[in-house]
């Protein structure tokens, strides 16, 4: 009976953390959608824009690293762990947005426009690296 209880608690925990993680990824996507010109969904799925897909993909990977680290290091207390995960995830979204805005201000041209341009642009790789670095830094800070 105890094994069944452990399984049920594990499944509930997985469901809770999974839902919080997916919500944070959706929030991150919406924030990027607000920062970039145009509709990200149309740019990626209709226009097949590689620049936009790389920017969004790197942000999702960075947030995934932050959320994963927050879950791994969370307390055994389920509700507190969910709160910590949500808090760190939202911090990750904010820091990724800030990094994007700072890069936009420090580099020539409008980074948002470059990241949604249909022609490949090397600046997009800098944005990707920035996203991944911010995610790694925050994940390390959490652990």
Image (tube, rainbow, N blue to C red):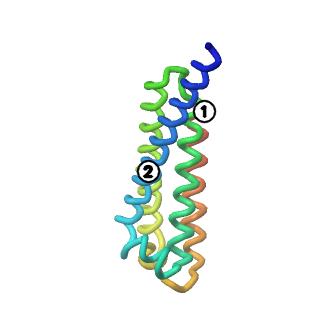
Q: Quadrant of residue 57?
A: bottom right
In the depicted structure, whether residue 75 falls above or below residue 28: above
For the point 59% across and 38% down, the residue is 69
Whole-percent x and y of residue 51?
54, 75
**Where is the C terminus found, in terms of image quarters?**
top right
Query: What is the x, y in percent for residue 98?
Result: 42, 56
- The numbered dot on residue 93 is 2
Residue beneath the point at 38% across and 59% down: 30
Question: Spatial distance from mark 1 to mark 2, Cα to Cα?
Answer: 19 Å
The residue lying toward the viewer, choosing from 121 and 109, is 121
Q: Residue at x 42, y 57 (%)?
A: 97
* Disc number for residue 92: none
Between 88 and 40, the one lying in front of the other is 40
Image-quadrant location for residue 142: top right
Task: State the image coordinates of residue 62 (x, y, percent, origin top left).
Answer: 56, 52
Residue 86, image quadrant = top left
Q: Which residue is mark 1?
A: 72
Q: Is residue 83 above or below residue 45?
A: above
- Which residue ends up furthest to the top in the rendered image? 2
Secondary structure at numbered mark 2: helix
Q: Secondary structure at mark 1?
A: helix
Query: Image quadrant for the N terminus?
Result: top right
Q: Residue furthest right?
A: 3
Question: Reading the chain from its start, which is encountered first: label 1 or label 2?
Answer: 1
Is residue 108 visible in this depiction of the protein? no
């Amino acid at each position: 009976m105890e094994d069944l209880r452990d399984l049920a608690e594990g499944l509930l925990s997985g469901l809770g953390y999974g839902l919080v993680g997916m919500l944070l990824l959706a929030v991150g996507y919406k924030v990027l959608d607000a920062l970039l010109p145009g509709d990200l969904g149309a740019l990626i799925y209709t226009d097949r824009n590689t620049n936009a897909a790389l920017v969004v993909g790197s942000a999702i990977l960075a947030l995934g690293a932050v959320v994963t680290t927050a879950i791994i290091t969370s307390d055994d207390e389920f509700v507190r762990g969910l709160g910590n995960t949500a808090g760190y995830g939202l911090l990750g979204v904010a820091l990724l947005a800030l990094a994007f805005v700072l890069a936009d201000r420090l580099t020539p041209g409008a980074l948002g426009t470059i990241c949604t341009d249909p022609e490949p642009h090397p600046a997009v790789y800098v944005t990707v690296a920035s996203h991944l670095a911010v995610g790694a830094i925050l994940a390390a800070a959490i652990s």
